[in-house]
Image (cartoon, rainbow, N blue to C red):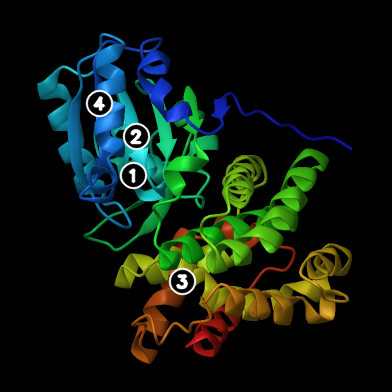
Amino acid sequence: MTFQYYAPVNLIFGRGNVDRAGEICAAFGKKPLLVTGTGSTKKSGLLDRCVNSLKSAGLDCAVFDKITQNPLTTTVYEGVEFARGSGCDMVLGVGGGSIMDAAKGIAFCMVNGGDVSDYIFGKKQSQKAIPIVLVPTTCGTGSEANQIAVLTNPETKDKKALYTMNIMPAASIVDPDVMMTMPQSVLSSVGFDAFTHALEAYTSKKANPITDAQALTAMELLAEDLPALIEDGSNVSAWESVSLAATLGGLVIGAAGVSAAHGLEHPASGLRNIVHGRGLAALTPPIVERLAPALPEKFAKISRLLGGKDERDCADRIRVLLKSIKLYVSLGELGILESDIDWLTENCLKISAGNLQNAPLTFGKDEIAKIYREAL
């Protein structure tokens, strides 16, 4: 048995810890660029809390609030110019996965010139990034715990991950209390994203004993507490569980990677700007039906976590989970057309070859197209 596990991020977990943002950022810079979205952190008051915490620690900040769903490389460049003009020397990302990924992209592009897509596709190698501190407000992507930032090029529609240890956060504040303003629809989507992170890493070719233990814990927590939260959003201990599960999911994909479901979903959300977790909900069951016979012991264990019997009913148990969290959708309902399938298939082979190879069974072009059609 040989494996490597390296995740140098200071994870600060617990309710109320967001008010320590200033104290934590002060260790890494003098003027943070506070990266956030267009509305939710303002409406919830979280943005003001973070700004006040920074001020209490003697730090000025500049706020860049233009991040949207499926963050664009062009928005990252805009953030870089704003950060440079404001004299920022570190980045504080406050928001969901899109915001955290954009924050990482900005920190990276502050010191790595040229087209970020060249680094994403491995044509150029990165040197470093300015320091990054993250505050997740959704329990889904796990971006707070890994070296991954998924960005979309608006010209090519390529949605692909920048993957480098240079964007590992210096620190991440995981405060379950700040998750509690999420609408039910957002919680369902991000929670299932976290579940698929754990599922794909657990069944990946790069899995190891540490990631297996983390992934199983994450899936168990989500299977029990995500449906409970959909029914009753006031359950504080359940918020702690799903927040922990999402961070564990981020850790496991940082080491073991994602595989086929993410590989097929990224082209869909890159093309049609659909919500990532909803795209995963449409694609994961038909993919699991194909993968389970190739790794029966692990898929049987996942099925039993979801109340099933063995690998043969794993996909159906995932469908039951999706119905329990009100996320049972098709690609057609999300805006994907039959005429999109050829482009999706070609783009999947272009941007997701590594993810496809990481699955226990590798899909070819015809099978990928067939999965897209089934998911319609």
Q: Which mark is residue 238?
A: none
Q: CA distance from mark 4 to mark 1?
A: 17 Å
Give the residue pinned by disc 1. Answer: 99
Residue 128 in view here: no
For this rendering, which residue is in front, 54 or 214? 54
Which secondary structure lies at badge 2?
strand
The type of residue carrying mark 2 is Gly
For this rendering, which residue is in front, 42 or 120? 42
In terms of sequence position, does the residue under pointer 1 or pointer 3 come before the other? 1
Residue 230 in view here: yes
Give the residue pinned by disc 3. Answer: 278
The type of residue carrying mark 3 is Arg
Identify whether 138 is placed above or below 230: above
In terms of sequence position, does the residue under pointer 4 or pointer 1 come before the other? 4
Tell me if label 1 and label 2 are in contact, CB under 8 Å. Answer: yes
Q: Which mark is residue 51?
A: 4
Q: How many marks?
A: 4
Q: Is 184 placed left or right of 218 in the picture? A: left
Which residue does the image show at 13% across and 30% down from the upper left?
82
